[in-house]
Image (cartoon, grey):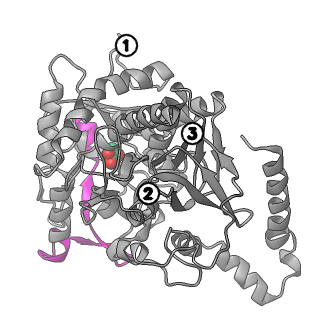
């Protein structure tokens, strides 16, 4: 929903953008052409996005670790702001436009709150969109929230905050029902019951999926709901600083409009941070499965005003990032592939880890196999990997299973003319998820009054290691809770 004023601005920006790029390209000097080509190179874009991370000042070095951002000077240090000029005056400000942000917005809206979602890129440009495998919930008679609780705690090596895990598993069946009622097309049997499968580290079949594009399907439905309700969204407008009132309570944020390069003041009664993860910081030089905007923004914003971080050092490597074929290097091979029976094998064709091991164990085993035992497989690009034996899937489940259960992956492979049943897929761990984050309570509240966090930016739920499918779950459980609580609180003030 753009205001007339914003539409005008967008037109202006579009006009200057086409002048800068396509239209005059033919008339450019070789040096100018080189600059344009460089600007459109994916690596260049990557660097630009990293420079946009909160705390990364113009002209400062590209951040490599969270500490670089946390310790950096404020982007506003040399900016003159008129705090009396309020651009958005709302009840609930939600910073981040993924699944957590959208579900928080819907629940805050249910409380009668006036809501604004401010997002760095577009609504739905988020890790939610990239989540392939599924969402966990113990909603079958042979399963129980208690069993789910034990699995989540075990996966996190019992470092998790118990009360958060308890909330997660108890709310889970209700979340699936909510999504189903909203129109998410979950995989179902002919009689209408949900199909559920195993994931790494889970003792029961409780993964609910929409083929291998579950996150995209959930985001489609949530985004439609946000639009249909007329909830305002400020796109390309990341928050760069949270504002506190004189009593130290969160009271708004400064947004930076990437199109107009203006700083905008959003005054709010409560604020929910839902900015997601940090994969695009490429810690230790690892590739990542994350979307471009995942640069730890929420952690920096909230930490600077006194919120507490938990397990911020516990980063999850997804064991099966693509090492080969090179056309799709770094892309994620969903864990669903392993849950269907695909097995990692070393250069001698030996299985060296149980195929449904947790991600920390599987990733460590692959790294060890390649770098210590020297049993990895060299690829033409110089990257090592292990073989993920996908033909096994058809042997176990019958011909046609790959088409039926992994259509998005098959489409990606087809685009590059690769037959995933014939070409060897080599995998190596890729940065996937921030296990820790900002410490919250059961309603997403931080220790800073009026400041809430939900989704990947929150910490404590998964302890030091998350199990597959519990992220799509936690963004919705705690997104909805934070939205309802912050919405109600904003109406009291
Ligand atoms: O929860 C996840 O991270 C997930 C389901 C990823 C995947 O492998 O598809």
The part of the chain drawn in magenta is 369-396
Mark number, residue 91 = 3
Measured from the top left, where is residue 363 in percent x and y?
Answer: 21, 61
Q: Which of marks 1 and 2 is nearer the N terminus?
A: 1
Measured from the top left, where is residue 91 in percent x and y?
Answer: 57, 39
**Above or below — where is 138 with respect to 444?**
above
State left or right for residue 122 relative to residue 305: right
Q: Which of marks 3 and 2 is nearer the N terminus?
A: 3
Point out the frontmost of discs 3 and 2: 2
Q: Disc 2 designates what residue? A: 248
- Asked if the beta carbon under badge 1 is closer than 8 A to the nearest atom of ligand 1, the reply is no
Give me the residue at 81% from left, 68% from top. Answer: 22
Q: Disc 1 designates what residue? A: 192
Q: How far apart are marks 3 and 2 (CA)?
A: 18 Å
Q: Can the viewer see residue 201?
A: no
Residue 352 placement: quadrant: bottom left
Q: How far apart are marks 1 and 2 (CA)?
A: 51 Å
Residue 407 placement: quadrant: top left
Indicate the secondary structure of the residue bearing disc 3: loop
């Amino acid at each position: 929903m753009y205001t007339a004023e914003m539409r005008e601005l967008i037109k202006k920006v579009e006009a200057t953008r086409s002048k800068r790029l396509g239209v005059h390209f033919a008339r450019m000097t070789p040096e100018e052409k080189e600059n344009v080509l460089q600007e459109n190179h994916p690596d260049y874009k990557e660097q630009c996005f990293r420079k946009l991370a909160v705390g990364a000042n113009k002209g400062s070095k590209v951040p490599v670790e969270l500490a670089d951002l946390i310790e950096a000077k404020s982007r506003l240090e040399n900016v003159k702001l008129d705090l009396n000029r309020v651009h958005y005056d709302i009840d609930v400000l939600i910073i981040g436009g993924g699944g957590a942000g959208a579900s928080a917005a819907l629940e805050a809206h249910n409380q009668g709150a006036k809501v604004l979602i401010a997002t760095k890129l577009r609504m739905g440009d988020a890790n939610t969109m990239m989540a392939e495998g599924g969402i966990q919930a113990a909603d079958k008679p042979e399963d129980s929230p208690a069993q789910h609780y034990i699995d989540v705690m075990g996966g996190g090596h019992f470092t998790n905050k118990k009360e958060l895990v308890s909330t997660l598993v108890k709310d889970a069946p209700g979340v699936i029902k909510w999504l189903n009622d909203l129109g998410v097309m979950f995989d179902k049997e002919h009689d209408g019951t949900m199909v559920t499968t195993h994931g790494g580290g889970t003792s029961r079949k409780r993964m609910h999926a929409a083929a291998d594009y579950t996150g995209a399907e959930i985001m489609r439905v949530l985004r439609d709901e946000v639009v249909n309700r007329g909830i305002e969204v400020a796109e390309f407008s990341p928050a760069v600083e949270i504002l506190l009132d004189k009593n130290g309570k969160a009271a708004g944020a400064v947004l930076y409009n990437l199109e107009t390069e203006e700083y905008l003041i959003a005054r709010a009664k409560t604020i929910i941070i839902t900015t997601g993860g940090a994969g695009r910081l490429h810690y230790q030089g690892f590739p990542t499965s994350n979307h471009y905007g995942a640069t730890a923004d929420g952690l920096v914003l909230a930490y600077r005003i006194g919120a507490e971080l938990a397990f911020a050092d516990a980063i999850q490597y997804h064991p099966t990032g693509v090492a080969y074929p090179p056309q799709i290097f770094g892309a994620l091979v969903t864990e669903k592939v392993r849950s269907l029976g695909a097995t990692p094998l070393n250069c001698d064709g030996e299985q060296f880890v149980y195929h449904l091991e947790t991600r920390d164990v599987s990733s460590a085993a692959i790294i060890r196999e390649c770098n210590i035992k020297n049993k990895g497989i060299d690829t033409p690009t110089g990257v090592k990997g292990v073989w993920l034996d996908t033909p096994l899937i058809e042997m176990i489940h019958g011909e046609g299973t790959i088409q039926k259960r992994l259509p998005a992956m098959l489409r990606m492979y087809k685009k590059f003319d690769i037959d995933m049943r014939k070409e060897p897929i080599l995998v190596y761990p890729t940065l996937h998820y921030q296990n820790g984050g900002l410490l919250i309570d059961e309603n997403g509240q931080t220790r800073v009054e009026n400041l809430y966090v939900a989704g990947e930016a929150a910490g404590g739920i998964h302890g030091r290691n998350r199990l597959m499918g519990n992220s799509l779950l936690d963004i919705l459980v705690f997104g909805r809770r934070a939205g309802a609580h912050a919405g109600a609180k904003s109406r009291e003030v």
